[in-house]
Image: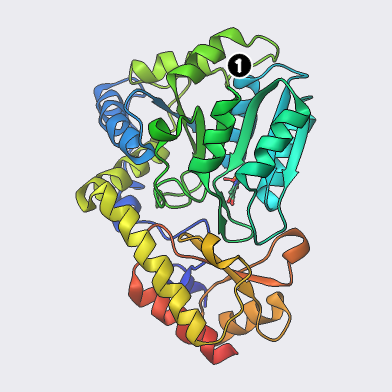
Amino acid sequence: MDERLTQGRWLRIPGPTPLHPNVVRALGHEMVPQRGTIITEMMARVQPILRKVHGTESGQVLLWASTGTAGFEASIVNMTNPGDKIVVTCAGDFGNRYAAAAETLGLDVLRVEAEWGSAVTPEQLDAAIQQHGDVVAVMITHNETSTGVTQDLAALAAVARQHDALICVDAVSSAAALPINMDVNGLDWVLSGAQKAWMCPPGLMISALSERAIARSHETKGYPRFIWDAPMMVEASRGNIHPATAPETSLFALDAALMAMEEEGIDEVFARHARLGAHFRAGLEKLGIEFLAEEALRSNSVTAFRAPGGSAKAFQAKVREQSGIELAVGQAQWQDVAIRVGTMGWTYEPELDATLEAIAAAM
Ligand SMILES: Cc1ncc(COP(=O)(O)O)c(C=O)c1O
Protein backbone atom coordinates (compact mmCIF):
# COMPACT_ATOMS: atom_id res chain seq x y z
CA MET A 1 0.00 0.00 0.00
CA ASP A 2 2.68 2.48 0.98
CA GLU A 3 4.67 1.81 -2.16
CA ARG A 4 1.70 2.55 -4.38
CA LEU A 5 1.04 5.68 -2.39
CA THR A 6 4.46 6.94 -3.32
CA GLN A 7 3.27 7.07 -6.91
CA GLY A 8 1.21 10.20 -7.12
CA ARG A 9 -1.71 8.67 -8.93
CA TRP A 10 -2.84 6.92 -5.75
CA LEU A 11 -2.98 10.14 -3.78
CA ARG A 12 -6.41 11.61 -4.40
CA ILE A 13 -6.73 13.87 -1.36
CA PRO A 14 -7.20 17.60 -1.93
CA GLY A 15 -3.65 18.44 -0.94
CA PRO A 16 -0.90 17.71 -0.73
CA THR A 17 -1.36 16.62 -4.32
CA PRO A 18 0.87 14.47 -6.56
CA LEU A 19 4.11 16.16 -7.61
CA HIS A 20 4.76 16.87 -11.26
CA PRO A 21 7.62 14.59 -12.44
CA ASN A 22 9.76 17.63 -13.27
CA VAL A 23 9.15 18.84 -9.73
CA VAL A 24 10.33 15.49 -8.36
CA ARG A 25 13.54 15.90 -10.36
CA ALA A 26 13.97 19.51 -9.25
CA LEU A 27 13.83 18.44 -5.60
CA GLY A 28 17.23 16.81 -6.07
CA HIS A 29 18.86 20.11 -7.03
CA GLU A 30 22.03 20.83 -5.05
CA MET A 31 22.14 24.00 -2.92
CA VAL A 32 23.58 27.14 -4.52
CA PRO A 33 24.58 30.59 -3.23
CA GLN A 34 21.32 32.13 -2.05
CA ARG A 35 21.91 35.48 -3.74
CA GLY A 36 23.79 34.10 -6.75
CA THR A 37 22.64 34.21 -10.33
CA ILE A 38 20.95 30.79 -10.27
CA ILE A 39 18.53 32.11 -7.65
CA THR A 40 18.14 35.65 -9.01
CA GLU A 41 17.56 34.44 -12.56
CA MET A 42 15.02 31.93 -11.32
CA MET A 43 13.20 34.55 -9.22
CA ALA A 44 13.07 36.81 -12.27
CA ARG A 45 11.81 33.94 -14.45
CA VAL A 46 8.98 32.83 -12.17
CA GLN A 47 7.48 36.27 -11.46
CA PRO A 48 5.77 36.80 -14.86
CA ILE A 49 4.32 33.28 -14.84
CA LEU A 50 3.07 33.71 -11.29
CA ARG A 51 1.43 36.96 -12.36
CA LYS A 52 -0.21 35.23 -15.30
CA VAL A 53 -1.62 32.46 -13.11
CA HIS A 54 -3.09 35.06 -10.74
CA GLY A 55 -4.36 37.21 -13.60
CA THR A 56 -2.41 40.32 -12.68
CA GLU A 57 -0.10 42.56 -14.67
CA SER A 58 0.84 45.03 -11.99
CA GLY A 59 0.76 42.88 -8.87
CA GLN A 60 3.83 41.47 -7.12
CA VAL A 61 3.89 37.81 -6.12
CA LEU A 62 5.74 37.05 -2.89
CA LEU A 63 7.11 33.66 -1.84
CA TRP A 64 7.41 32.95 1.86
CA ALA A 65 8.74 29.70 3.33
CA SER A 66 5.55 28.60 5.05
CA THR A 67 2.08 27.18 4.33
CA GLY A 68 -1.26 28.66 3.31
CA THR A 69 -2.32 29.35 6.89
CA ALA A 70 0.53 31.82 7.25
CA GLY A 71 -1.12 33.76 4.44
CA PHE A 72 -4.02 34.47 6.81
CA GLU A 73 -1.64 36.04 9.28
CA ALA A 74 0.51 37.84 6.71
CA SER A 75 -2.52 39.40 5.01
CA ILE A 76 -3.98 40.50 8.34
CA VAL A 77 -0.85 42.10 9.81
CA ASN A 78 -0.13 43.98 6.58
CA MET A 79 -3.61 45.01 5.46
CA THR A 80 -5.17 45.91 8.83
CA ASN A 81 -4.49 47.44 12.23
CA PRO A 82 -5.65 45.82 15.49
CA GLY A 83 -9.30 46.59 16.17
CA ASP A 84 -10.16 47.20 12.50
CA LYS A 85 -13.50 45.94 11.29
CA ILE A 86 -13.45 43.17 8.74
CA VAL A 87 -15.98 40.77 7.24
CA VAL A 88 -15.08 37.13 6.57
CA THR A 89 -17.10 34.81 4.34
CA CYS A 90 -17.56 31.55 6.24
CA ALA A 91 -18.86 28.77 4.00
CA GLY A 92 -16.88 25.99 5.65
CA ASP A 93 -13.92 25.11 7.82
CA PHE A 94 -11.36 27.31 6.06
CA GLY A 95 -13.51 30.44 6.14
CA ASN A 96 -13.88 29.78 9.86
CA ARG A 97 -10.12 29.49 10.21
CA TYR A 98 -9.50 32.81 8.47
CA ALA A 99 -12.03 34.38 10.84
CA ALA A 100 -10.40 32.68 13.84
CA ALA A 101 -6.98 33.98 12.81
CA ALA A 102 -8.38 37.50 12.55
CA GLU A 103 -10.08 37.25 15.95
CA THR A 104 -6.90 35.91 17.52
CA LEU A 105 -5.03 38.91 16.14
CA GLY A 106 -7.56 41.31 17.65
CA LEU A 107 -9.66 42.37 14.67
CA ASP A 108 -13.36 43.17 14.99
CA VAL A 109 -14.69 40.32 12.84
CA LEU A 110 -18.16 39.88 11.42
CA ARG A 111 -18.60 36.38 10.04
CA VAL A 112 -21.06 36.10 7.19
CA GLU A 113 -22.08 32.48 7.18
CA ALA A 114 -23.40 30.08 4.58
CA GLU A 115 -24.78 26.61 5.22
CA TRP A 116 -22.10 24.03 4.49
CA GLY A 117 -22.49 23.00 0.86
CA SER A 118 -23.69 26.42 -0.23
CA ALA A 119 -22.00 29.79 -0.64
CA VAL A 120 -22.24 33.31 0.74
CA THR A 121 -24.37 35.42 -1.60
CA PRO A 122 -23.42 38.94 -2.74
CA GLU A 123 -26.60 40.22 -1.04
CA GLN A 124 -25.57 38.63 2.26
CA LEU A 125 -22.11 40.14 2.01
CA ASP A 126 -23.52 43.56 1.15
CA ALA A 127 -25.84 43.47 4.17
CA ALA A 128 -23.02 42.33 6.45
CA ILE A 129 -20.70 45.13 5.34
CA GLN A 130 -23.43 47.70 5.89
CA GLN A 131 -24.31 46.24 9.27
CA HIS A 132 -20.71 46.20 10.51
CA GLY A 133 -19.88 49.67 9.15
CA ASP A 134 -16.42 51.09 8.25
CA VAL A 135 -15.21 47.73 7.02
CA VAL A 136 -11.51 47.88 6.16
CA ALA A 137 -11.21 44.49 4.49
CA VAL A 138 -13.27 41.55 3.29
CA MET A 139 -11.77 38.06 3.46
CA ILE A 140 -13.16 35.63 0.88
CA THR A 141 -12.53 31.89 0.60
CA HIS A 142 -12.50 31.35 -3.15
CA ASN A 143 -12.69 27.58 -3.04
CA GLU A 144 -13.88 25.98 0.21
CA THR A 145 -11.86 22.76 0.37
CA SER A 146 -13.91 21.43 3.28
CA THR A 147 -17.20 21.46 1.32
CA GLY A 148 -16.18 21.32 -2.35
CA VAL A 149 -17.80 24.69 -3.04
CA THR A 150 -16.41 27.41 -5.29
CA GLN A 151 -17.75 30.78 -4.20
CA ASP A 152 -18.59 33.46 -6.78
CA LEU A 153 -15.39 35.43 -6.36
CA ALA A 154 -16.22 38.04 -9.00
CA ALA A 155 -19.63 38.84 -7.50
CA LEU A 156 -18.40 38.91 -3.89
CA ALA A 157 -15.40 41.03 -4.81
CA ALA A 158 -17.63 43.50 -6.69
CA VAL A 159 -19.65 44.05 -3.51
CA ALA A 160 -16.52 44.58 -1.42
CA ARG A 161 -15.20 47.08 -3.98
CA GLN A 162 -18.44 49.05 -3.84
CA HIS A 163 -17.74 49.58 -0.15
CA ASP A 164 -14.10 50.41 -0.87
CA ALA A 165 -12.89 47.52 1.29
CA LEU A 166 -9.62 45.74 0.65
CA ILE A 167 -10.14 42.21 -0.67
CA CYS A 168 -8.09 39.33 0.68
CA VAL A 169 -8.67 35.96 -0.93
CA ASP A 170 -7.90 32.48 0.34
CA ALA A 171 -7.06 30.80 -2.95
CA VAL A 172 -5.29 27.81 -1.41
CA SER A 173 -7.29 25.25 -3.38
CA SER A 174 -8.05 27.44 -6.39
CA ALA A 175 -4.79 29.13 -7.41
CA ALA A 176 -3.35 27.37 -10.49
CA ALA A 177 -6.58 25.38 -10.90
CA LEU A 178 -9.30 27.99 -11.35
CA PRO A 179 -9.00 31.46 -12.90
CA ILE A 180 -8.63 34.12 -10.20
CA ASN A 181 -8.56 37.20 -12.47
CA MET A 182 -6.95 39.32 -9.81
CA ASP A 183 -6.89 42.58 -11.79
CA VAL A 184 -10.34 42.20 -13.32
CA ASN A 185 -11.85 41.37 -9.91
CA GLY A 186 -9.87 44.08 -8.13
CA LEU A 187 -8.36 41.70 -5.56
CA ASP A 188 -5.68 42.94 -3.21
CA TRP A 189 -4.10 39.96 -1.46
CA VAL A 190 -4.42 36.46 -2.91
CA LEU A 191 -2.84 33.71 -0.83
CA SER A 192 -2.18 30.06 -1.56
CA GLY A 193 0.12 27.15 -0.73
CA ALA A 194 2.44 25.28 -3.08
CA GLN A 195 1.08 21.83 -2.17
CA LYS A 196 -2.22 22.16 -4.01
CA ALA A 197 -2.68 22.84 -7.72
CA TRP A 198 0.87 24.21 -7.94
CA MET A 199 2.03 20.54 -7.98
CA CYS A 200 4.77 21.20 -5.41
CA PRO A 201 5.54 19.96 -1.90
CA PRO A 202 4.15 21.88 1.09
CA GLY A 203 6.41 24.61 2.41
CA LEU A 204 5.84 27.66 0.25
CA MET A 205 3.20 30.32 0.86
CA ILE A 206 2.44 32.27 -2.27
CA SER A 207 0.86 35.71 -1.95
CA ALA A 208 -0.01 38.03 -4.82
CA LEU A 209 -0.35 41.67 -3.80
CA SER A 210 -2.01 44.44 -5.78
CA GLU A 211 -0.47 47.91 -5.95
CA ARG A 212 -3.18 49.03 -3.56
CA ALA A 213 -2.18 46.27 -1.13
CA ILE A 214 1.47 47.25 -1.34
CA ALA A 215 0.59 50.90 -0.66
CA ARG A 216 -1.59 49.85 2.26
CA SER A 217 1.20 47.73 3.76
CA HIS A 218 3.34 50.88 4.03
CA GLU A 219 0.57 52.63 5.99
CA THR A 220 -0.36 49.94 8.52
CA LYS A 221 1.84 50.16 11.57
CA GLY A 222 -0.38 48.55 14.20
CA TYR A 223 1.09 45.06 14.26
CA PRO A 224 4.70 44.32 15.05
CA ARG A 225 5.92 42.30 12.06
CA PHE A 226 9.26 41.13 10.88
CA ILE A 227 9.34 38.13 8.53
CA TRP A 228 5.73 38.89 7.51
CA ASP A 229 6.61 42.49 6.63
CA ALA A 230 5.25 42.92 3.11
CA PRO A 231 7.27 46.06 2.23
CA MET A 232 10.49 44.16 3.02
CA MET A 233 9.33 41.17 0.98
CA VAL A 234 8.24 43.33 -1.97
CA GLU A 235 11.60 45.09 -2.05
CA ALA A 236 13.50 41.79 -1.97
CA SER A 237 11.19 40.23 -4.54
CA ARG A 238 11.67 43.16 -6.93
CA GLY A 239 15.42 42.60 -6.55
CA ASN A 240 14.89 38.89 -7.29
CA ILE A 241 16.16 37.78 -3.92
CA HIS A 242 14.69 36.55 -0.65
CA PRO A 243 15.16 38.69 2.49
CA ALA A 244 16.37 35.68 4.49
CA THR A 245 17.96 32.45 3.26
CA ALA A 246 15.98 31.57 0.15
CA PRO A 247 13.93 28.36 0.50
CA GLU A 248 15.92 27.00 -2.43
CA THR A 249 14.42 23.53 -2.75
CA SER A 250 10.89 24.93 -2.66
CA LEU A 251 11.84 27.51 -5.28
CA PHE A 252 13.46 24.95 -7.60
CA ALA A 253 10.27 22.91 -7.32
CA LEU A 254 8.02 25.88 -8.07
CA ASP A 255 10.19 26.90 -11.00
CA ALA A 256 9.83 23.42 -12.51
CA ALA A 257 6.07 23.40 -11.93
CA LEU A 258 5.63 26.84 -13.50
CA MET A 259 7.67 25.85 -16.55
CA ALA A 260 5.40 22.82 -16.98
CA MET A 261 2.31 24.99 -16.63
CA GLU A 262 3.67 27.53 -19.09
CA GLU A 263 4.37 24.74 -21.54
CA GLU A 264 0.84 23.41 -21.20
CA GLY A 265 -0.53 26.96 -21.41
CA ILE A 266 -2.08 28.66 -18.38
CA ASP A 267 -5.53 28.84 -20.00
CA GLU A 268 -5.26 25.16 -20.87
CA VAL A 269 -4.38 24.38 -17.24
CA PHE A 270 -7.64 26.05 -16.19
CA ALA A 271 -9.54 24.30 -18.99
CA ARG A 272 -8.10 20.92 -17.96
CA HIS A 273 -9.28 21.45 -14.39
CA ALA A 274 -12.77 22.33 -15.62
CA ARG A 275 -12.78 19.16 -17.75
CA LEU A 276 -11.46 16.95 -14.95
CA GLY A 277 -13.92 18.30 -12.39
CA ALA A 278 -16.84 17.68 -14.74
CA HIS A 279 -15.50 14.25 -15.72
CA PHE A 280 -15.19 13.14 -12.12
CA ARG A 281 -18.62 14.46 -11.14
CA ALA A 282 -20.23 12.74 -14.14
CA GLY A 283 -18.65 9.45 -13.04
CA LEU A 284 -19.92 9.89 -9.50
CA GLU A 285 -23.38 10.73 -10.75
CA LYS A 286 -23.51 7.44 -12.63
CA LEU A 287 -22.78 5.71 -9.32
CA GLY A 288 -25.71 7.49 -7.68
CA ILE A 289 -23.42 9.36 -5.28
CA GLU A 290 -24.93 12.19 -3.24
CA PHE A 291 -22.96 15.41 -3.69
CA LEU A 292 -22.62 17.67 -0.67
CA ALA A 293 -22.21 20.93 -2.58
CA GLU A 294 -25.09 22.60 -4.39
CA GLU A 295 -24.99 21.79 -8.07
CA ALA A 296 -24.10 25.22 -9.42
CA LEU A 297 -21.34 25.66 -6.83
CA ARG A 298 -19.45 22.39 -7.28
CA SER A 299 -15.72 22.90 -7.42
CA ASN A 300 -13.46 21.71 -10.20
CA SER A 301 -10.52 21.21 -7.84
CA VAL A 302 -12.17 19.22 -5.03
CA THR A 303 -15.36 17.19 -4.88
CA ALA A 304 -17.17 16.39 -1.64
CA PHE A 305 -19.82 13.70 -1.41
CA ARG A 306 -21.73 11.81 1.27
CA ALA A 307 -19.82 8.68 2.29
CA PRO A 308 -21.55 5.57 1.00
CA GLY A 309 -22.49 3.36 3.95
CA GLY A 310 -22.67 6.29 6.36
CA SER A 311 -19.15 6.51 7.78
CA ALA A 312 -16.48 8.43 5.91
CA LYS A 313 -13.66 6.89 7.92
CA ALA A 314 -14.93 3.36 7.21
CA PHE A 315 -15.36 4.10 3.50
CA GLN A 316 -11.92 5.71 3.27
CA ALA A 317 -10.37 2.65 4.93
CA LYS A 318 -12.23 0.27 2.61
CA VAL A 319 -11.08 2.09 -0.53
CA ARG A 320 -7.52 2.20 0.80
CA GLU A 321 -7.57 -1.51 1.60
CA GLN A 322 -9.10 -2.59 -1.70
CA SER A 323 -7.28 -0.31 -4.13
CA GLY A 324 -4.52 1.57 -2.35
CA ILE A 325 -6.12 4.85 -3.33
CA GLU A 326 -6.13 7.47 -0.63
CA LEU A 327 -9.27 9.63 -0.33
CA ALA A 328 -9.84 12.35 2.26
CA VAL A 329 -12.57 12.34 4.88
CA GLY A 330 -14.44 15.49 5.88
CA GLN A 331 -13.54 18.27 8.29
CA ALA A 332 -15.15 19.52 11.51
CA GLN A 333 -18.87 18.62 11.57
CA TRP A 334 -18.49 16.74 8.30
CA GLN A 335 -15.53 14.69 9.46
CA ASP A 336 -17.28 11.33 9.29
CA VAL A 337 -19.92 12.45 6.76
CA ALA A 338 -17.93 13.60 3.74
CA ILE A 339 -15.49 11.98 1.38
CA ARG A 340 -13.35 14.55 -0.44
CA VAL A 341 -11.41 13.92 -3.61
CA GLY A 342 -8.84 16.26 -5.13
CA THR A 343 -8.93 16.71 -8.89
CA MET A 344 -6.25 19.37 -9.03
CA GLY A 345 -2.62 19.70 -10.01
CA TRP A 346 -0.76 16.84 -11.70
CA THR A 347 -3.96 14.99 -12.55
CA TYR A 348 -5.55 13.48 -15.65
CA GLU A 349 -8.51 11.26 -16.56
CA PRO A 350 -6.92 7.80 -16.01
CA GLU A 351 -6.30 8.26 -12.30
CA LEU A 352 -9.76 9.76 -11.85
CA ASP A 353 -11.26 6.76 -13.65
CA ALA A 354 -9.28 4.44 -11.39
CA THR A 355 -10.62 6.38 -8.40
CA LEU A 356 -14.20 6.05 -9.68
CA GLU A 357 -13.69 2.31 -10.08
CA ALA A 358 -12.33 2.04 -6.57
CA ILE A 359 -15.29 3.99 -5.18
CA ALA A 360 -17.73 1.80 -7.08
CA ALA A 361 -16.04 -1.36 -5.78
CA ALA A 362 -16.23 -0.15 -2.20
CA MET A 363 -19.91 0.84 -2.29
C1 LIG B 1 -9.01 26.70 1.37
C2 LIG B 1 -7.86 26.46 2.28
N1 LIG B 1 -7.40 27.46 3.03
C3 LIG B 1 -6.35 27.30 3.86
C4 LIG B 1 -5.72 26.10 3.98
C5 LIG B 1 -4.57 25.96 4.91
O1 LIG B 1 -3.41 25.78 4.19
P1 LIG B 1 -2.12 25.11 4.82
O2 LIG B 1 -2.52 23.77 5.31
O3 LIG B 1 -1.14 25.10 3.69
O4 LIG B 1 -1.65 25.98 5.95
C6 LIG B 1 -6.15 25.01 3.23
C7 LIG B 1 -5.51 23.69 3.34
O5 LIG B 1 -6.02 22.68 2.94
C8 LIG B 1 -7.24 25.19 2.34
O6 LIG B 1 -7.69 24.19 1.57
Displayed quadrant of residue 216:
top right
Q: How is the image coloured?
A: rainbow
* Furthest residue toward left: 263
Q: Position of residue 290 (x, y in %)?
A: 61, 78
Foreground pick, 137 / 351: 137
User: What residue sits 73% from the left and 65% below the top?
Assistant: 334
Q: Amino acid at mark 1?
A: Phe
Q: Classify 52 as above or below 340.
A: above
Q: Position of residue 107 (x, y in %)?
A: 76, 25
Q: Classify 97 as above or below 268.
A: above
Q: Is residue 181 visible?
A: yes
User: What residue sits 60% from the left and 90% below the top?
Assistant: 363
Q: Classify 235 as above or below 70.
A: above
**Disc 1 target residue:** 226
User: What residue sits 58% from the left and 89% below the top?
Assistant: 362
Characterize the local packing of mark 1: few (<14), some (14-19) or many (20 or more) Cα atoms within 10 angstroms: few
Name the side, left or right, on which 19 lies relative to 342: left
